[in-house]
Image: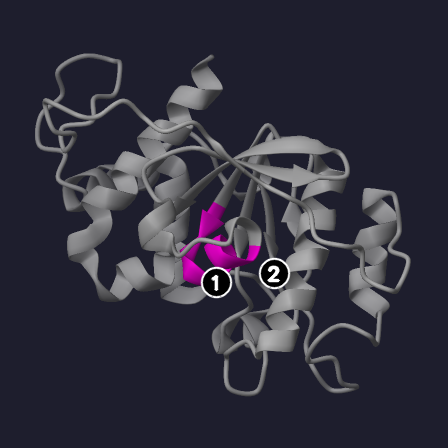
Amino acid sequence: MADAASVLSWWADAGVDVMVDEAPRDWLRPKAKPAPAAPTVTAAPAETQETLPGQLDLFQGWLRESTSLPFASPTARRICPAGDPTSGLMILTDMPAAEDCTTGTLISGEVGRLFDRMLAAIGRNRESIYLASLSCLRSPDGRFTSAAATQCASLARHHVGLAGPRALLLFGDNCSKALLGLGMAQARGRWHEVATHGGTVKTLVTLSPSFLLNQPAYKAQAWADLQMLMEEFKQ
């Protein structure tokens, strides 16, 4: 009952006030809308100088141990990928929050509880997604330098290619710029394709749970994005 109440609370915050049928409807979509643009395909950048592991389990081990990662230091806490890489859905956030470095869990605390409600609203949980970040280490000020952002984008593209998800969901502006070369505001509302060494991956951008926690008025926009994601997995 608690899980059901949590999902209903998320729907209420997102503006869902009536159930019409089982198929989700985008109530925020205008009646008249131009024909959607063709999905954008972003080209993979040149490979980094270091040869990266070509298997997902080996790459995960490399993330746990490599000293060449941006922000790596002997005392820095690493929050590595979690969940099921075979689930078909990979979710990427930018870097661990300060609280995540304490709990050892990516997207934790109050933000994590909102994230769990978002997952429940689309019939998922942490065990039925693959959750990762551009950087498994947090920078001292919680921001990316230009050089670190470039390196993390290359690593993330390689990571996505190894995981080979059916769909990739990007949280926030940093992830959108890293994988698509577009700001979140430009990228939201349509599907993209990200080129990797393993093939192209359908990609969607939405607002991060941390942003939504501070700006709950935008939950309706996030819900519209999640509905697009659900429709993809119905096909």
Category of crowding for the residue at label 2, using alpha-carbon neighbours closer than 10 angstroms: few (below 14), some (14–19), many (at least 20)? many
Cβ–Cβ under 8 Å for marks 2 and 1: yes
For the rendered model, the colour scheme is one colour
Q: Is residue 79 above or below residue 39?
A: below
Specify the label residue 174 is tagged with. 1
Where is residue 195 drawn, in percent x and y? 65, 38
Q: Quadrant of residue 16?
A: top left
Q: CA distance from mark 2 to mark 1?
A: 9 Å
Q: In this picture, is 221 found above or below 77?
A: above
Q: Amino acid at mark 1?
A: Asn
Quarter of the figure with the N terminus: top left
For disc 2, the marked residue is 134
Dot placed on the residue nearer the N-terminal end, 2 or 1? 2
Residues 126 and 186: in front is 186
Give the residue displayed 21% in from the left and 38% down from the top.
11
Q: Give the percent coordinates (x, y) of residue 167.
A: 54, 32
In the structure shown, which secondary structural element does the residue marked by tag 2 occupy?
loop
- Secondary structure type for disc 1: helix
Viewer-side label of 2, 1: 1
Between residues 131 and 175, which one lies in front from this camera angle?
175
Between residues 110 and 185, which one lies in front from this camera angle? Answer: 185
Q: In this rendering, does residue 84 appear at all?
A: no
**Would you say the magenta stretch is mainly helix, strand or loop?**
helix
Comparing 209 with 53, the one in front is 53
**Identity of the residue drawn at 89% across and 51% down:** 53
Q: Residue at x 66, y 54 (%)?
A: 156
Judge from the rendering whether residue 204 lies leftward or rightward of residue 77; answer left or right.
left
x and y percentages locating residue 198 in the rendered image? 76, 34
Q: Position of residue 55 (x, y in %)?
A: 87, 43
Q: Is residue 154 magenta?
A: no
Q: Which residues are magenta?
A: 170-178
Left or right side of 164 for 141? left
